[in-house]
Each structure stands twice: as structure tokens, then as C-alpha cells.
Amino acid sequence: MRKRAFSGIQPTGNLHIGNYLGAIRQWVERQAEFDNIFCVVDLHAITVPQDPAELHEATRQVAALYVACGIDPRQSVVCVQSHISAHAELAWILNCVAPMGWLGRMTQFKEKSAKQRETVSAGLFVYPALMAADILLYHTDVVPVGEDQRQHVELTRDLAIRFNQLFGEVFTVPEALIRETGARIMSLAEPTKKMSKSEPAGSIALLDPPDTIRRKIARAKTDPLTTIEFDESRPGIYNLLTIYELLSGQDRPTIEARFQGKGYAEFKRELADLVVEALRPMQERYAEIRRDPASIEAVLRDSADRIRPTAERTLSEVKVRMGLG
Ligand code: TYM
């Protein structure tokens, strides 16, 4: 029996190379090893205000990008969170099992709510319980994500253990799968912050045209030194080199030797060529997929039908154990 992998991305803003290098790439690389569910988590997206038409469109866009990046919908489940109502229902139950203190310690919530303490939605606070529901409904073993989701997966583990202790063994306790390199791609504009969908200037979107990619890389922040080396104390150049390393497949000494004595401008030009070429086939496949919207709708509908019974089975077991109904 293959292990179950579950992961998801919010349909908010444009997916960027951080999402790709931190998450999607390892989904694709290890696709055959696991029994996969890759979800577009639209219920998570509404924890902050969304335009309804844009949200609907972004959900299809993210699903199409999964496929364009190499997820094969015959091999892996590609689904939409809100198509399976058990996610929201288990999330409610987990809200009642999760202590406020645990949720209040989540750094992502603290960061996102810092600017607007009073107006932020209650959904944003309980968001990690919904993520735990996503994962726990399918007896997930591994959760391939970027570094910023580590704490949420830890909370999921804690919730599973707590529930199992209180009501009996129902949930599998999952593990985060986080790659050593690329789990935290930084913003090109502010390399001490992570690349984020909400900051398009600092991120390279998977669908950015070549000239936009070249411009963003040319403007990427570096430092006044001139050497091109993997030095973590120099976040700008370190981040660009990491992207180069991941997309070229070359090792660090080879890359440093290649750029020894060369300037930032030349390195950036080569990096831009590499990124443009790496994204080209994905962008072409994406355009093809979007020309046939009915087929992506069918994939999403069939996938939900395929996994709904598993989710409902877990949910009914939870209800029985808790005395619900
Ligand atoms: P989201 O939509 O913010 O990000 C999607 C995935 O991309 C990774 N990621 C990055 N990796 C490297 N560098 C970056 N700069 C970077 N930015 C984002 C994220 O770690 C993530 O893997 N809560 C989740 C979505 C979610 C989920 C789940 C994930 C909901 N339910 C269940 C796994 C399992 C989120 O907001 O990801």
C-alpha cells in the first residue's frame, strides 16, 4: 500500500515560483511514490475578502496549473475543497477540540492579523483547524509543503493526537514533507521576506511572460559585494543562486565556479534565461488546458466523487465517537 499524500494551495493571487519550488515540484517528483490528493483550497481563500467571480476563476486556474506543472489527474486526485462538504463539517468539530491558545500561537495568523486586529475574520483564526480537517479526513501520511506551513502541520499532528486520546484512535498522525532546498524562496524585492502571492513585485508568477520575468530578475535586490557565492548572510544573492541551483540541477561548487569573476548582471541574465526556459513548457501546457474548460470541470467533479466516500467515512466515525447524531 502506498502512503497517502495530501496538499493544497489557496486560489488567491497568482501562483509563483515559490509555490512551485517549495510545493508543486515535489508533488510531481514523488507522484508515483504516493497515493495523492492535491486540493484547491477555496474555503481557505475566503478567510479574507474575495471577489466571487475572481475566486471562481482562480480556482480553475490553480487546478489547471497543477496539471500543467505535471500532475496527472489519472494518477492523482485534483479536487476543490468546497466540493466535499465533509471538510467544513470536520473543521467545525476540530474547532471545538482545538484550544484557543494553540491557534493563537500560529505565526501566520499573528502576521496576517497584526494590521487589522478587530476586523480580521474569525475564519482566519480557525484556518489551521480547516487545514487539519483537509489532512485528517483522508488518513494522510505525508503533507508535502513549503517551510511556512510546517507549524500548521505540527498543529494538525497535535490535534490528531488530542482527538485520538479523547475519543479513541480515528486519525492517522501525518508528517510534513519539506525539502531541504527551496522550502522558503524569498521575495526578489525584499529578500528577507518570503516570496508571497500578495506581493507580485517580489515574486515571479508561473504565468509571467518572459519580458516580465527578465525585468523582475534584473531588478532583484542584491548587495554591494560582487562575488557570486552561496552565502546565507547575503539573502538576495543567496536566494537567486538557490533558484538557479533548483532549476539547473547543478551543484553549488559547479555554479560558483561558473560565475567566478563574473558580474551580477551576467548572472542575472543567465538566471532569467533559465527561469524563462523552465516555465515555457508549463505555460504552453496551461494555455492548452484552458482552451478546454469542460475537461478541467470534469476532472474536478470526478475527483470529488472519487474521494468523497473516504471523507464521509472518516467523518461518520468521528461523529459516532463523539456521540453526535
Ligand atoms: P499557500 O496557498 O500559501 O501556499 C501553497 C504552497 O506553497 C508553499 N509556499 C512556498 N514555498 C517556498 N517558498 C515560498 N515563498 C512559498 N510560499 C508558499 C506553501 O508552503 C504551500 O505548500 N494553508 C496552506 C494551504 C492548505 C494546505 C492544506 C496545505 C490548506 N489545506 C492541507 C497542505 C495540506 C496555504 O495557505 O498554502
Image (cartoon, rainbow, N blue to C red):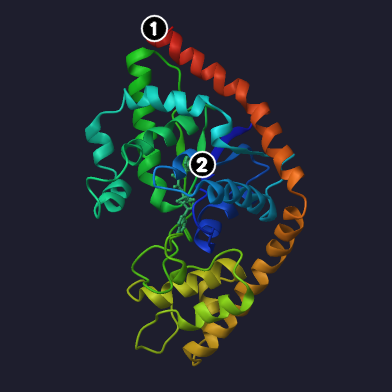
Image quadrant where one finds the C terminus: top left
Mark 1 and mark 2 residues within 8 Å of each other at the beta carbon: no
Judging by the rendered image, the residue that carries numbered circle 1 is 323
Q: Secondary structure at mark 1?
A: loop
Q: Is residue 244 left or right of residue 170?
A: right
Question: How far separated are the C-alphas under marks 1 and 2?
Answer: 30 Å
Tag 1: amino acid: Gly
Judging by the rendered image, the residue that carries numbered circle 2 is 42
Task: Please count the marks in the image.
Answer: 2
Looking at the picture, how far across and down is residue 221, in whole percent?
40, 80
Q: Residue at x 32, y 41 (%)?
A: 121
Against 91, residue 182 (above or below) is: below
Residue 59 can be seen, yes or no: yes
Looking at the picture, how far across and down is residue 66, in whole percent?
64, 50
Disc 1 or 2, which lies upstream in sequence? 2
Q: Is residue 121 left or right of residue 39?
A: left
Q: Residue at x 47, y 74 (%)?
A: 240
Residue 75 can be seen, yes or no: no
- Give whichever of 192, 292 is nearer the camera: 292
Residues packed near mark 2 inside 10 Å, few (<14), some (14 to 19) or many (20 plus): many
Q: Is mark 2 within 8 Å of ligand 1?
A: no
Kindly indicate the quadrant of the structure image that contains residue 313: top right
Q: Secondary structure at mark 2?
A: helix
- Give whichever of 35, 101 is nearer the camera: 101
Residues packed near mark 1 inside 10 Å, few (<14), some (14 to 19) or many (20 plus): few
